[in-house]
Amino acid sequence: MTPFSRSRVVWILRHLQTLEAGEKPGGYSSSYTELPMTKKGGGWAPFEGPAGLAAVVTERLERCGQDGVCVYLCYCFRRDWQTVSRMMGLNYYDMKKRMNWVIGYISGEETKPFSYRAFVAAMQLVKS
């Protein structure tokens, strides 16, 4: 299983603030907080794994513009989705679809070699 599968990305987003602080969330699974290709054993500070994991997801999320903001508010800050959709001036179901695209874009072992906008355009072609 990839370290950045959809379910793991959602888990990371829900614990992003804790991970950014370099801490492991209570009840964590070590496979969720280990970065791929990181050095095992000595040489790494205890905060580097969680903080690095948060940095990878945050960097990917920041490439997603307004849709990324919706994901950030709803998953990281656990804001009510209906409220966020009203604040952003979006239809609730359209926002959910966009947020699903964001999760798809930031998931995967490697960072996507194309922009989020190109990813959305491809997703819209697939759906039509």
Image: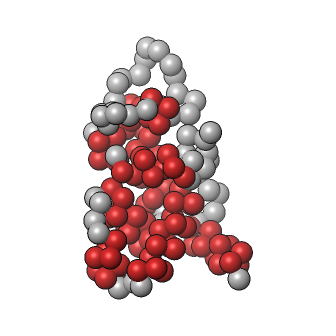
The spot of residue 114 in percent (x, y) is 63, 63
Spot the residue most to the top: 42
Q: Is residue 75 visible?
A: yes
- Quarter the N terminus occupies: top right
Residue at the image point whose x is 57% and y is 30% from the top: 37
Residue at the image point whose x is 60% and y is 73% from the top: 120
90 shown above or below 109:
below
14 shown above or below 26:
below
* Relative horizontal placement of residue 114, taking residue 17 as reference (left or right): right
- Quarter the C terminus occupies: bottom right
Give the image quarter of residue 113.
Answer: bottom right
The spot of residue 31 in percent (x, y) is 50, 32
The spot of residue 112 in percent (x, y) is 62, 56
Residue at the image point whose x is 45% and y is 59% from the top: 61
Give the image quarter of residue 115.
Answer: bottom right
Colouring convention used in this rendered image of the protein: secondary structure
Q: Is residue 20 visible?
A: no
Nearer to the camera, 123 or 118? 123
Nearer to the camera, 7 or 123? 7
91 shown above or below 43:
below
